[in-house]
Image (cartoon, rainbow, N blue to C red):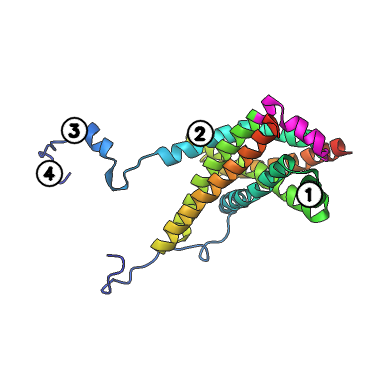
Amino acid sequence: MADSPSRVERPLSPHLQIYRPLFTMVMSIVHRITGIGLYFGMVLFVWWLLAAASTPSAFAAYSWLAGSFIGLLVLFGFTWAMLHHALGGVRHFIWDFIHGFGPQERMLLAKATLAGSVTLTIVLWIIGLAVKG
Amino acid sequence: MSNPTHTPMRTPLGRVRGLGASHTGTEHFFLQRVTGLANLLLMIAFIVIVIRLAGASYAETRAVLGQPLVAVIILLTLLSVTVHMRLGMQVVIEDYVHTEGLKVALIIANTFFTIAIALAGAFAVLKISLGG
């Protein structure tokens, strides 16, 4: 029926261009974008495992790339995306139990997610770089 | 519903078991939550392992990844994460791809990709753990 030529032109519901971006809305979009990023980022994790399962030269190639500026930048981005998506998931769990829907609560949860993901990323990288030496 | 005196032959349980035209119920939603919870717990162990191996040599990485506890944690992570990935990407595809053929092709590609990721990672961990 959707492809019927005699289809009536009905009004469409407003979409992204219509709304002023709201913080909670942007956070929702970022949750999805980080999810997509992590999806493809998993290739890097499996590459690391396969390199360790293969030859020393394959592992050396991976280590060199991971330790390069671009490599560290990507891994930093992956860390933040992972923590942001994880904390965003916790926010969804809170909503699943029918809490945190009030106007102030929504904003507080969104701000806490962002602040938490950024802080945790920096803290983990300080620890990681200290361990790496 | 329009006729309140009409009593359907099918019981409410029989109706709900039919699950309507989609033939599925809340499994997708629920499994996304269950794997999300598992991911949250496994992520903590994963972070510890990765930080422990930051800048580690080939031999050291293999020694740590080969430890039974570490290997099991990584295998569980691969399982839970790839199921979660597959469900999540399926929703993204269904939301944005409206051409029926392309949508089905991408959903199949999503299944292929996530299973390949899971098995490649699992193979690597098992190869390191079980020798060779």
Residue B11 position in % (x across, y down): 19, 33
* Tag 3 and tag 2 share a subunit: yes
Q: Secondary structure at mark 4?
A: loop
Residue A132 position in % (x across, y down): 85, 38
Main secondary structure type of the part rendered in magenta: helix
The quarter of the image holding the C terminus of chain B is top right
Marks 4 and 1, Cα distance to the nearest angstrom? 68 Å
Q: Amino acid at mark 2?
A: Val
Residue A95 position in % (x across, y down): 51, 38
**Label 2 sits on residue:** B34
Label 4 packing within 10 angstroms: few (<14), some (14-19), many (20+):
few
**Label 3 sits on residue:** B11
Q: Secondary structure at mark 2?
A: helix
Give whichever of B62, A124 is nearer the camera: B62
The residue depicted at 78 percent of the width and 52 percent of the height is A71
What is the span of residues highlighted in magenta in the rendered image? B55-71
